[in-house]
Image (cartoon, helix red, strand yellow):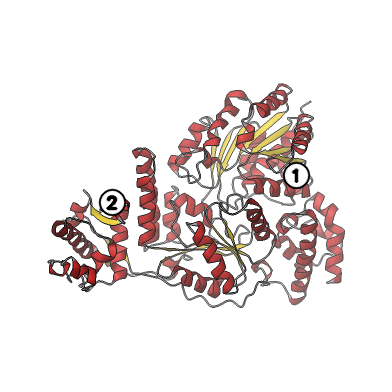
Amino acid sequence: MQTIAPAPQSILHEVFGYEQFRGPQADIVDHVIAGGDALVLMPTGGGKSLCYQIPAIARQRAGHGVSIVVSPLIALMHDQVGALHEAGVDAAFLNSTLSGEEANAVEKRMLRGEITLLYAAPERVTTLRFLAQLDALHERGQLSLFAIDEAHCVSQWGHDFRPEYRALTVLHERYAGVPRLALTATADAITREDIVERLQLEQARQFVSSFDRPNIRYTIVEKKDATTQLLRFIEAEHAGDAGIVYCQSRKRVEELAQTLVAEGINALPYHAGLDAEVRQRHQDRFLREDGIVMTATIAFGMGIDKPDVRFVAHLDMPKNIEGYYQETGRGGRDGLPAAAWMAYGLQDVVNQRRMIDESPAGEDFKQVMRGKLDALLTLAEAADCRRVRLLEYFGEASTPCGNCDNCLNPPDIWDGTDAARKLLSTIYRVQQQSGISFGAGHIMDILRGKPTEKVKQFGHEALSTFGIGAAFSETQLRGVLRQLIATGSLAVDASAFNTLQLTAGSRAVLKGELPVKLRESVSTPSGGKRRQGSAKATPAVAAGLSDDGQVRFAALKAWRAEVARAHNLPAYVIFHDATLAAIAALAPQSLDDLQGVSGIGAKKLDAYGEEVLRVVSSA
């Protein structure tokens, strides 16, 4: 029997321990509770999960039955279900970690209406067996809601396309009256349109939050010795902090982890080539321990809810802005200052263009991917505010942030048009004289007048362009090459040892019709003061506490770690650092004192209240 749904505000306070919704959360929750479909774009750390968890609880209490959450990641399912249990919500997951007997037990509980939220992967949701079970629930009016998390996975234009998401159209076709909520942290206009079409959400209301993450400082440097640059960055600004470092290759991931460990940094590798047990162990340590740096390919990250990641670094340029934004967004989920640092160079541009050109995809797809790569390169080469550029990509207007590298240390601009013309002229004359193509290093040697053995071997010192670019540094010329390759004014032939080839677009540059403006090279981190930190560094959220408050905070963290280990959950699932800091500042004497602390719901107050008071009083 269906009744009136309880007020979402009361669920927010009672279950999750928060006083107020953030941003558009309240409107989304009201819309979905009322049975409406929705597409939600909300940045990482913006509180997307509450947008379906609260409607699921409200609709279940009103008699609508179970909500199905489609999620692509086992680790995320486990942690979210664990967090819901801690909050007193009946939740479960179905994935490959369960035995057949355990999975059958979960399915029986679902069919009996004992579960509020059930998490499952798209592959399982679309099986005939599972659909038959959903049919049974639907016939009884006990199928409440579908939440499709990481919805960008349905789009071929998205940064993490997963073909299995395409089959989710069956949910609309088979259960048209059941509300559907699709959620993603990042999608440009073309991806957003694809999500709507693929999931048949044409009639759904769209909620687009600001993509701005003002607590993240964006810094992009030209790659010289990337490992040394990264070490300087970590030592100067993030000693003892948790962080993620993304690399393009598995080999690089493992080598970098070893280097960081040798430098005294607590680092672990993560990539798809590692044994599944090793990957799980490393991910668990990252989530459960303080101050670990994870070196990883993009196989690591989606669904990582760790709130206190203080930096995300890229040692290789990602494929597009969506991927960059999603990955950098894993820093500073707690709202405290975090850094997004990237080193990029000419080889990154070459590699990414080659992967697009050599892919088996159709030309239309390749053209879109080239456009996305060019947008990321434009962001990297920009001399104005990074945040303005980033938000502009997602269709959001903004003003200079005053917090990115360009705002803090505005770079000088130089006109690279003359250098570009001389580079292209040199390539043309080399091909004309030798009948073959050469790579970037050799072309720059000719232009700068360096009589190397290779230059002499081919007689290239006799070319009219030999030495006419002696005034340009190698760094400047590499910047010019990046721009020419990115804009299609120059091509790289991967099948011929990455040799440079003129294109139809070269003509406009050679004629001086297309100007080339570049930023002066900045290859070192901004001169931040070295932090006095260690692996035991006090989180920034607790920095303002008194000496006694710091003692209470440390005691609460130690107690929380014991509880988390006993429950096999990340510590932040028990209580966030911000909640512990608030308790430490308050020094509560009674359970009534704890009731107003953000992050302490009724179930947690009942489960941990007395223990918290004991820890505080004995600290």
Question: In which quadrant of the rendered view does residue 24 lie?
Answer: top right
Residue 566 visible to the viewer: yes
Q: In this view, does 502 lie to the left or right of 330?
A: left
Q: Where is residue 272 in the image (x, y as percent from the top left)?
A: 56, 51
Q: Nearer the viewer, mark 1 or mark 2?
A: 2
Q: What element carries label 1?
A: helix
Q: Which is more toward the observer, 343 or 182?
A: 343
Q: Which is more toward the observer, 124 or 144?
A: 124
Which residue shows up at 68% across the image and 71% down it?
538
Tell me the tag on residue 10. Answer: 1
* Position of 126 relative to 525 (above/below): above
Q: Which is more toward the observer, 567 or 31?
A: 567
Name the image quarter holding the N terminus: top right
Q: Position of residue 61 (x, y in %)?
A: 77, 35
Residue with the mark numbered 2: 488
* Position of 541 relative to 16 (above/below): below
Name the image quarter holding the C terminus: bottom right
